[in-house]
């Protein structure tokens, strides 16, 4: 099966490698995202077999060049898998309709909600906010109407896709390798802390999110400070390309002693030792202003690590009964949740183990790619 994976932005090496295992893969991606994200090196290191074509230029040059690329090349493939449902999928679904090639979209974020976070953070003005949202809604309406099938990462995003698409399903993106993300003993947790130069006897809060407009690091910082003020000897660990911004944000918020309890480090390779940080932590915290699927929470649960998350979007749907959910931008509630996890470790771990069962049944990597292969084959009229 020849699959064209059409990206409109960043994508994860775990998805690329998994996709390359189930089909004859060609990936098309904007040149800037491909080069700046380090994906090129990660593909080379992985040994994955695929062809990569880059589209140069920023908007609107990307929009025109990618559409012309599709018109010239789309018929070389049995099916197109198109990332999200906005600018890239607008081109892909129109080209697919014109050339008679099925296009499956895969929605990984809630586009309108994410875009509104830019306005909430005052990164864009009123006019740009109105115009941008109008374009997003237009693109989603067209791609939803013209797609062969619209997948959403998890049940929440499936329903978001269903607002404009008549045929929908659930896609698990790269899933979670539950054979690697596993619970560890207290002795192994201690060993991992020593290996990664983490405090041995302090309460480690893992905030793995990048610095982005839809994330809410402010609430995590305030919540940690409040929990510490109530006697919790906690450190806050952030891994990501923006970890220096995270440290600077703490100072901007007036948390003068934050350097004593924040550990900021660059992102680690997701296919190497990332899982060990989940296993070494006492709790994973995910605070967001908008959220589609939040894979870090699923990876933490697979590792048996308790999770605290904002009660919104896909997290509200997927984590109910499996994590501590707190209201949006409520640092008091998040601090209380941190204290509960610290004071009730057995109950918190038991709740996380319920989450692991859910991840094993619905998000396991092997299942996710098997399901995706079947979906793509059905969409282009092939069978294994």
Image: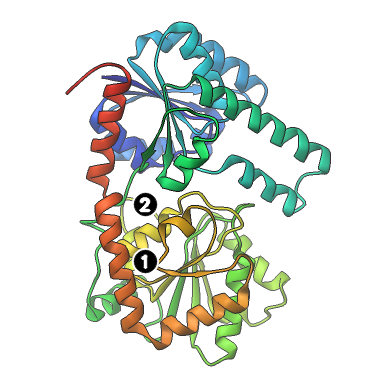
Q: Which residue is mark 2?
A: 270
Give the answer, above or below, for where 263 lies relative to 170. Answer: below
Q: For label 2, count other residues whose C-alpha is less than 10 Å away and answer few (under 14), some (14-19) or many (20+).
A: few
Location of mark 1 (residue): 277
Residue 37 in view of the camera: no
Identify whether 1 is placed above or below 368.
above
Using the rendered view, name the quadrant where residue 243 is placed: bottom right
Residue at x 41% of width, y 81% of height: 199
**Position of the C terminus by quadrant:** top left
Residue 102 in sight: yes
Where is residue 219? Give x, y as percent.
Answer: 62, 69
Which residue is outermost to the left? 384
Q: CA distance from mark 1 to mark 2?
A: 11 Å
10 Å crowding of disc 1: few (<14), some (14-19), many (20+)? many
Sequence-first disc among 1 and 2: 2
Instruction: From the viewer's side, name the closer residue of 373 and 20.
Output: 373
Give the number of the disc on residue 211. none
Secondary structure at badge 2 equals: loop
């Amino acid at each position: 099966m020849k699959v064209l994976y059409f990206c409109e932005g960043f994508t994860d090496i775990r998805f690329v490698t998994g996709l390359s295992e189930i089909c004859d893969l060609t990936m098309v991606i904007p040149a800037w995202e491909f080069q700046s994200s380090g994906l090129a090196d990660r593909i080379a290191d992985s040994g994955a077999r695929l062809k990569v074509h880059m589209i140069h230029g920023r908007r609107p040059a990307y929009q025109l060049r990618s559409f012309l690329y599709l018109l010239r090349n789309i018929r070389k493939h049995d099916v197109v898998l198109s990332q999200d449902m906005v600018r890239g999928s607008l081109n892909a679904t129109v080209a697919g309709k014109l050339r008679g090639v099925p296009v499956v979209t895969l929605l990984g974020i809630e586009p309108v909600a994410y875009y509104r976070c830019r306005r909430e953070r005052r990164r864009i003005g009123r006019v740009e906010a109105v115009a941008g949202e109008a374009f997003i809604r237009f693109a989603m309406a067209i791609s939803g109407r013209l797609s062969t099938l619209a997948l959403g990462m998890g049940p929440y995003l499936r329903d978001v896709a269903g607002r404009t698409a008549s045929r929908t399903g659930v896609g698990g993106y790269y899933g979670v390798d539950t054979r690697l993300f596993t619970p560890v003993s207290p002795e192994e947790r201690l060993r991992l802390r020593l290996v990664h130069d983490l405090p041995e006897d302090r309460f480690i809060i893992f905030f793995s999110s990048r610095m982005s407009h839809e994330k809410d690091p402010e609430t995590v910082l305030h919540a940690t400070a409040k929990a510490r003020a109530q006697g919790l000897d906690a450190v806050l660990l952030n891994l990501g390309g923006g970890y220096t911004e995270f440290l600077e944000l703490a100072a901007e918020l007036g948390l003068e002693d934050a350097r004593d309890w924040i550990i900021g480090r660059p992102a680690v390779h997701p296919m190497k030792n990332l899982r060990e940080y989940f296993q070494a932590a006492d709790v994973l915290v995910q605070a967001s202003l908008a959220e589609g699927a939040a894979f870090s929470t699923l990876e933490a649960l697979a590792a048996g690590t308790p999770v605290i998350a904002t009660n919104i979007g896909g997290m509200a749907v997927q984590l109910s009964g499996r994590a501590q959910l707190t209201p949006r931008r409520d640092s008091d509630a998040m601090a209380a949740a941190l204290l509960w996890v610290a004071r009730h470790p057995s109950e918190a771990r038991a709740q996380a183990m319920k989450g692991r069962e859910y991840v094993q049944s619905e998000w396991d990597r092997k299942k996710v790619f098997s399901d995706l292969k079947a979906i793509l084959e059905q969409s282009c009229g092939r069978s294994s």
